[in-house]
Each structure stands twice: as structure tokens, then as C-alpha cells.
Image: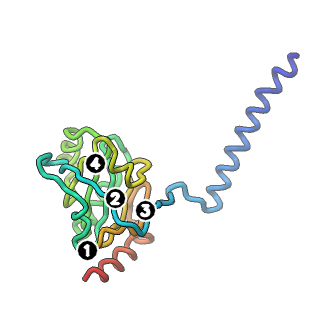
Amino acid sequence: MRRNALLVPLIIFTAIVIALFWQLTRNAQGDDPTLLESALIGKTMPQFHLASLTDPSQRFDNRVFMQGKPLLLNVWATWCPTCRAEHQYLRQLALEGVRVVGVNYKDNRQQANAWLRELGNSYIINLDDGDGMFGLDLGVYGAPETFLIDGNGVIRYRHAGELNAEVWEREMKPLWERYSREGR
């Protein structure tokens, strides 16, 4: 009886080790957990009506994304440490002429505005998605996530995780340049 009692924990431990080993080898083979499929690639932005984060009396809808020029839609929050890490790079992109719309996701408006005052505001518009419903419509898993939207409001690319120089140069910049040429 005592022998069986020791066997159960050993079996559970072995199963956990096998699962962890499988996960590690899966990632070593090139599976990137930040590459999340999006059913919205190639589709128009979901309909929305959201208030500005900085001025709640100002409201925005899909026309924000139909200006004839591409832009980035960056989902961020003050509770997200990776958002803080990527913020300076977004500021750099904005200074280089990349238009970025922010979506403050499931956050406190006052804290978010204080965060922007402290770190600077890289966004041409910042939408308040306090209840997360717009993020849900976008298929957001968490923050940060960045979408490349063409000038007609069509989602062309999605990146989950930190947007940095490597990701921009390798994945997003070629698309940005393509849709910038098409929008002229």
C-alpha cells in the first residue's frame, strides 16, 4: 500500500517533466509564442465608438483608421511592464513620422494620463477602452499588442508583445513602407 502511495507522486512528477520538456523543445524548433494567429488579418477594423483617453468629451470611431495612410494601433496599459519598456521605441517611431493610435486597455484613466505625462505621449489619438470590449473585438490577449492598419482601415499585421527595433525592422517596416506607397 505504501509503495503505491509513492508511485502516484512519481507519475505526476514525470508527467510534468515531460510536458515542460515538450514545451521547451517546441520553442527551440522555432515556435514563437508571440506569433498569435488573428482572424482579423485582411479584414476591416471592428466597429467602435470610444472616448479619447485625454478628453472624454471627444469621441472617435472607425474613421480614425480610414485616412489614406497606414498607422499602428498600439494596445497598452499602465499595469503592463512591457508597455513601459516599449514606450520609448514608440516615441522614436512617432518622431520618425509613424502615426500611432493608442488604446489604453482595461486601465484607470487617471493613472494612464499620469503615465503619459511622465513618459510622454507618442500617440496621435489615445482611445479609452476601460472595459476591454474593443480589445475583445480585436482579439487582444493582453498588452502590449500592436496592429498595422492600412490607409483603408484594414488590419494587415498583428504583433503580440514588445514592439522594438528588431521587430520593427524585420516584420513591420516592410509592410509599413508598402502600405505607405499604396496610400499615396
The image quarter containing residue 65 is bottom left
Q: Earlier in the sequence, mark 2 or mark 3?
A: 3
Q: Could you say which is closer to the camera, residue 7 or residue 40?
A: 40
Question: Would you say 176 lies left or right of 12 here?
Answer: left
Per the model, the C-alpha gap separating discs 4 and 2 is 17 Å
Marks 1, 2: nearer the viewer: 2
Residue 166 appearing in the image:
no
Circles 1 and 3, Cβ within 8 Å, touching? The answer is: no
Per the model, the C-alpha gap separating discs 1 and 3 is 19 Å
Which SS class for mark 2?
Answer: loop
Q: Could you say which is closer to the camera, residue 74 or residue 48?
A: 48
Give the labeled residue for mark 3: 40
Q: Earlier in the sequence, mark 3 or mark 4?
A: 3
Give the labeled residue for mark 1: 69
Give the labeled residue for mark 4: 104
Question: Would you say 171 lies left or right of 63 here?
Answer: right
Residue 76 appearing in the image:
yes
Q: Earlier in the sequence, mark 1 or mark 3?
A: 3
Residue 46 - label:
2
* x then y, percent, for residue 174: 39, 76
Per the model, the C-alpha gap separating discs 1 and 2 is 18 Å
Circles 2 and 3, Cβ within 8 Å, touching? The answer is: yes
Tell me what residue is drawn at x 22 percent, y 64 percent: 63
Say what amino acid the circle numbered 1 marks. Lys
Q: How many marks?
A: 4
